Amino acid sequence: MSTNAQSIARNEPAGNVAASPAKWQLWTGRVLTALAVLFLLFDAAGKFMMPVPVVQACERLGFPVRLSPTLGVMLTIATLLYAFPRTAVLGAVLLTGYLGGAVAIQMRAGSSLFEMVFPVIFGILIWGGIYLREARLRRVFPIR
């Protein structure tokens, strides 16, 4: 039996992908994840408290202010799913959809380039955090 076949039979990674992330990968991934979670929870809190800048942003984007708490609930749930390792990939997928909607509404409103690109950059941060700390994800999407 080949080395790869033996690895697969034992449910171990094949090739040069480590069974667990290196210490620097794990901690970098944790820091990126923590920064993303803190920012997203802060954003969700703003959608519940509706300070003046949030109300003004809703009006500028043509988004009904009454839907802001609903967005806050959706963002909180997706963020909490992302924060827990067992459900992190599901949370990242849901956050990717949420951020895609943010890009679409910014484009529709004719916002600045930064406002349109920021959700994309943030999505990269989210996936970068989980990619660095999750060896199974690196096996599915290897970067060579």
Image (cartoon, helix red, strand yellow):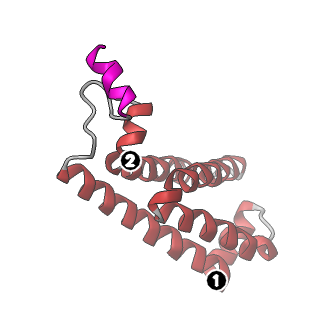
Real-space CA distance between mark 1 and mark 2, rounded to the nearest whole angstrom: 32 Å
Q: Quadrant of the C terminus?
A: top left
Give how far across and how far down residue 109 sits, in percent.
70, 53
Q: Secondary structure at mark 2?
A: helix
Q: To which residue does mark 2 refer?
A: 128
Q: Amino acid at mark 1?
A: Val
Please indicate, yes or no, whether residue 50 appears anywhere in the rendered image: no
Residue contact at pointers 1 and 2, CB within 8 angstroms: no
Residue at x-position 38% and y-position 27%? 8
Q: Is residue 4 magenta?
A: yes
- Comparing 68 with 41, the one in front is 41
Q: Is residue 49 left or right of residue 28?
A: right
Residue at x-position 39% and y-position 60%? 33
Q: Residue furthest front?
A: 1
Q: Is residue 36 magenta?
A: no
In magenta, the rendered stretch is 1-10
- Comparing 50 with 95, the one in front is 95
| Number of numbered discs | 2
Residue at x-position 75% and y-position 72%? 70
Residue 118, compared with residue 79, is above or below; it is above
Q: Quadrant of the N terminus?
A: top left
Q: To which residue does mark 1 refer?
A: 52
Give how far across and how far down residue 38 sits, in percent.
44, 72
Which mark is first along the chain, 2 or 1?
1
- Comparing 82 with 68, the one in front is 82
Q: Amino acid at mark 2?
A: Gly
